[in-house]
């Protein structure tokens, strides 16, 4: 079995993407922000296809954060409708390509139509195994951890005989609990921060920042990020000598 420290010799198992820059892309063209979101959907299609072709088994996209509710209501409503319409149109294609879709985040806060459509697509793609596409929707990393702590405390209050809490046990309580740790985190749009995204899962992720705005992000850009990842030495606290490599 390949060790974690050597994993960068192969494509990352789990890639997460902060899709930033839709609004700025639209503004540069004298358009409303929603115009950027519409074109950002085309990029999502390209990158899902690229990940599928590269046989990356897990792709997670930061689709809508808990903080995004602070944006103008017109933009939020348009974005929610765009998300629902897009996933509905792509349902057959996702099934055909063996892609499992799941939502991580607080679904209770979403419009009923959005929840209904995403739940149906999740059910219909649930047995697919070629790739897992996770959409972080109404998601926040701090909220995810806080919810997990509350649920864990309640379970242990009800059953004091449960085993001592380990990282593995705690992970099961996370909304993203069935996902492996992130190997590569990509952020488009030129900003260099993680914006409350998958805080537990990115503990040892390789970070890749690009100035390319999301609607302009291409398959070639995605492949370049993966190639950059492959050049990196992942030591997990060890030395280069311990993992059989030497810094030149």
Image (cartoon, grey):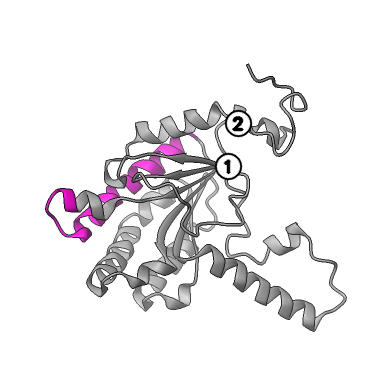
> Residue 2, located in which quarter of the rendered image?
top right
Image location of residue 141, percent across then percent down? 54, 63
Provide residue 88's location: percent of width, then percent of height: 33, 61
- Magenta stretch secondary structure, dominant: helix
Q: Is residue 2 above or below residue 200?
A: above
Disc on res. 120:
none
Q: Residues within 10 Å of mark 2 (few under 14, many from 20)?
A: many
Q: Which residue lies at the image location 71% right of the left edge and 26% below the top edge?
A: 240
Task: Mark 1 or mark 2: name the one nearer the start of the chain.
Answer: 2
Q: Which residue is mark 2?
A: 8
Q: Which residues are magenta?
A: 27-54
Specify whether residue 136 is painted magenta.
no
Decide if residue 88 is on the left or right side of residue 58: left
Between residues 116 and 184, which one lies in front from this camera angle?
184
Residue occupying the far top of the picture: 248
Q: Residue at x 46, y 51 (%)?
A: 193
Within 10 Å of the Cα at label 1, are there few (<14), some (14-19), or many (20+) other Cα atoms?
many
Residue labelled with disc 1? 183
The quarter of the rendered structure image containing the C terminus is: top right
- Residue at 51% over, 41% down: 207
Mark 1–mark 2 Cα distance, whole angstroms, equals: 9 Å
In this rendering, is residue 67 above or below 17? below
Give yes or no for contact between labels 1 and 2 (Cβ–Cβ under 8 Å). Answer: yes
Residue with the most extreme bottom position: 158
Secondary structure beneath dot 2 equals helix
Q: Is residue 45 magenta?
A: yes
């Amino acid at each position: 079995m390949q060790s974690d420290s050597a994993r960068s010799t192969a494509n990352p198992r789990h890639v997460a993407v902060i899709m930033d820059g839709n609004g700025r892309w639209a503004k540069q063209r004298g358009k409303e922000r929603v115009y950027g979101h519409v074109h950002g959907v085309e990029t999502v299609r390209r990158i899902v296809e690229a990940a599928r072709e590269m046989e990356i088994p897990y792709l997670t996209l930061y689709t809508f954060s808990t903080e995004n509710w602070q944006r103008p209501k017109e933009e939020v409503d348009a974005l929610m409708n765009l998300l629902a319409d897009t996933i509905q149109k792509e349902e057959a294609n996702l099934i055909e390509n063996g892609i499992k879709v799941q939502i991580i985040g607080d679904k209770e806060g979403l419009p009923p139509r959005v929840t209904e459509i995403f739940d149906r697509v999740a059910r219909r793609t649930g047995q697919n195994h070629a790739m897992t596409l996770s959409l972080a929707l109404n998601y926040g990393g701090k909220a995810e951890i806080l919810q997990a702590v509350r649920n864990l405390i309640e379970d242990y209050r009800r059953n004091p005989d449960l085993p001592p809490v380990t990282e593995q046990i705690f992970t099961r309580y996370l909304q993203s609990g069935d996902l492996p740790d992130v190997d590569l985190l990509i952020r488009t749009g030129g900003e260099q921060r993680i914006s409350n995204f998958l805080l537990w899962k990115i503990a040892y992720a390789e970070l890749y920042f690009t100035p390319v705005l999301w609607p302009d992000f291409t398959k070639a850009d995605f492949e370049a990020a993966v190639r950059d990842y492959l050049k990196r030495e992942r030591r997990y606290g060890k030395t280069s000598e311990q993992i059989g490599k030497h810094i030149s």
